[in-house]
Image: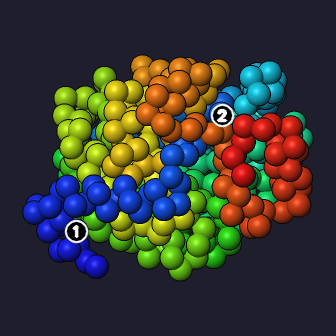
Amino acid sequence: MDIDYFLSLLREDKEELVNQAYEKKNKIYNQIVTYSRNIFVPVTHQCRNRCGYCGFVSDDPNSWITPEGFREILIKAKNSKSNEILITLGEKPEEKYESAKAFLNSIKFSSTVEYVKYLCNLTLEKKLLPHSNLGILSYEELSILKECNASLGLMLETSSSRLLSIDHPHFLSPGKIPETRLEVIKNAGKLKIPFTTGLLIGIGETWEERIDSLLKLSEIGKKYKHIQEVIIQNFNPQPGTPMENHPPPSAEEFLLSISLSRLILPPEVSIQIPPNLNRDRVVTSLKYGANDLGGISPVSIDYINPKMEWHNESQLKTMLKKESYVLQKRLPVYPQYEKYLNSRIREIIEDFYQNEETIST
């Protein structure tokens, strides 16, 4: 099936599109909805990219988290019974900022990857599971981080190189070249790294480009069998950014993107939506083919969308139960991908399974 087939479904039979997506989802996930209890850790807001929609990026040289500050976060994670430490930062800040180099040198590291490796090992020492998303990484950098992460991530966002042109959101973002990002995802597959990727819906891409993005991810996922989840994230305008007045995608655009994802991607790939960006349509998203709600934190905010609060877990569980859904906590690596991990990380996972009955196996 090609782009034209899915376009025809969109134009001529949306009801059939949604029904097929829901049926495909139910064959594997039925009424189970998963999420990960995590803590979101922005290592730094400095970034070499300047995406038109991003409110995360900052030139502030004091935005770096120190090793001491990170250890305090790990204590909060243990106290809140979180299992995932989501480690993220601006892409390759040392390429752009002398202050980034200076900070890394001051703590005896030569790169962000080297520093994140250290933070991941601190996380594992506390019997917690790191999931890192650092932007573009080389094959060698991926192989380094594989040894100290339960999973890694990189949003594709879009396969459209058109959005790199002037007056488009990726014009000032060298790390958003689609071919480069797809190569990272392929390399992660070659290394057998459990991987998360996704699309950003509503930043100027067309339906043809959305479908093309999903087809490319599907091809990689079928070949390497390492993509465990794909996030369908709706653009949320951020104040102070070039796209602050750009309209978000309509509810229909977002929901139909979920259905297309479910139909195009391999059946074992979870379709995730950010619940804090879709507070009033979580249940509807599940009916369109989603089955996962990503990371929900009892401690940290969503630093990408800081005004969008997480759901209270118990309230979310009650809301879903009314619709006959069962909310289950999971780990940042899905069970079928644990075989790709080293024994050190698998032992921590076994501890979670033994001590927490709520974790889905």
160 or 202, which is in the foreground?
202
Q: Residues within 10 Å of mark 2 (few under 14, many from 20)?
A: many
| Amino acid type assigned to the residue bearing label 1 in the image | Phe
Residue 117 seen in this snapshot? yes
In the image, residue 197 above or below residue 219: above
Question: From the image, which quarter does the N terminus lie in?
Answer: bottom left
Q: Any mark on residue 38, and which? A: 2
Which numbered mark, 1 or 2, is in the foreground of this view? 1
Q: Residue at x 55, y 46 (%)?
A: 32
Image quadrant of residue 339? bottom right
In the image, residue 56 above or below residue 230: above
Q: Residue at x 66, y 55 (%)?
A: 334
Q: Secondary structure at mark 1?
A: helix
In the image, residue 294 above or below residue 299: below
Percent position of residue 235, x then y: 31, 39
Percent position of residue 248, x then y: 23, 36
82 or 317, which is in the foreground?
317
Q: Residue at x 26, y 51 (%)?
A: 256
Q: Residues within 10 Å of mark 1 (few under 14, many from 20)?
A: many
139 or 125, which is in the foreground?
125
Image quadrant of residue 285? top left
Q: Which color scheme is applied?
A: rainbow
- Relative placement, left or right, of 101 versus 355 is left
Percent position of residue 73, x then y: 74, 25
Residue 110 seen in this snapshot? no
| Amino acid type assigned to the residue bearing label 2 in the image | Asn
224 or 63, which is in the foreground?
224
Q: Any mark on residue 135, and which? A: none
- Relative placement, left or right, of 41 versus 258 is right
Q: Any mark on residue 6, and which? A: 1
Q: Secondary structure at mark 2?
A: strand
Percent position of residue 150, x then y: 73, 53
